[in-house]
Image (cartoon, rainbow, N blue to C red):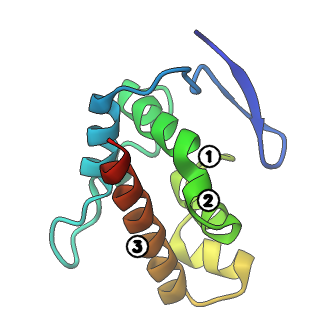
Amino acid sequence: MKCRSMYGQGMFLEGVVKLKITIEDINYFIFMIKREKLGVRKRYFSILHNKDSDEYKRFINVYLKYKKVVSEREQLVLDSVYGVNGAPLKLKEVAQIIKVTPERVRQLVFKSEREMATFLRQKY
């Protein structure tokens, strides 16, 4: 089912929000946010610039459904990094928006992704 939802600053994500999230979608999301090695980019960076791809839609569907698990500030950070309201932003750009250092943004991303993964593992 295609939905038309509005997020943030008037940007639209069409066809992204699904009614049902499968366990495979949950596992995919957790796999994508999982840290592989120190200094290696997370797997989701490869799909963020292709919003029409099934991988991006699958990833963002899970995020949008369960983003309430984290604080509003963390949601703003993840929305910006994942490109929910437009193009994905770099940590430095997000840092300028919320007036913190890029390192603090990285910490917020890590903390909020860990919280979401823990919640999803417990729920499913």
Query: Judging from the image, what secondary structure is the residue with disc 3 in?
Result: helix
Residue occupied by mark 3:
110
Q: Residue at left 58%, top 90%?
A: 101
Q: Position of residue 29 (x, y in %)?
A: 34, 44
Position of residue 123 in the picture relative to residue 18 (left or right): left
Query: Judging from the image, what secondary structure is the residue with disc 1 in?
Result: loop
Q: Which class describes the residues within 10 Å of circle 2: few (<14), some (14-19), or many (20+)?
A: many
Q: Residue at left 63%, top 80%?
A: 95
Tag 2 near tag 1, CB within 8 Å = yes
Quadrant in the picture for residue 45: bottom left
Instruction: Pick whichever, 57 or 121, lies toward us.
Output: 121
Residue occupied by mark 1:
84
- Gap between marks 3 and 2 measured at Cα: 14 Å
Q: Which class describes the residues within 10 Å of circle 3: few (<14), some (14-19), or many (20+)?
A: some
Position of residue 16 in the picture relative to residue 120 (left or right): right
Judged by depth in the image, the label closer to the viewer, 3 or 1, is 3
Instruction: Pick whichever, 63 or 80, lies toward us.
Output: 63
Q: Amino acid at mark 3?
A: Phe
Q: Position of residue 27 (x, y in %)?
A: 26, 40
Residue 20, above or below 67: above
Residue occupied by mark 2:
80
Q: Residue at left 32%, top 56%?
A: 33
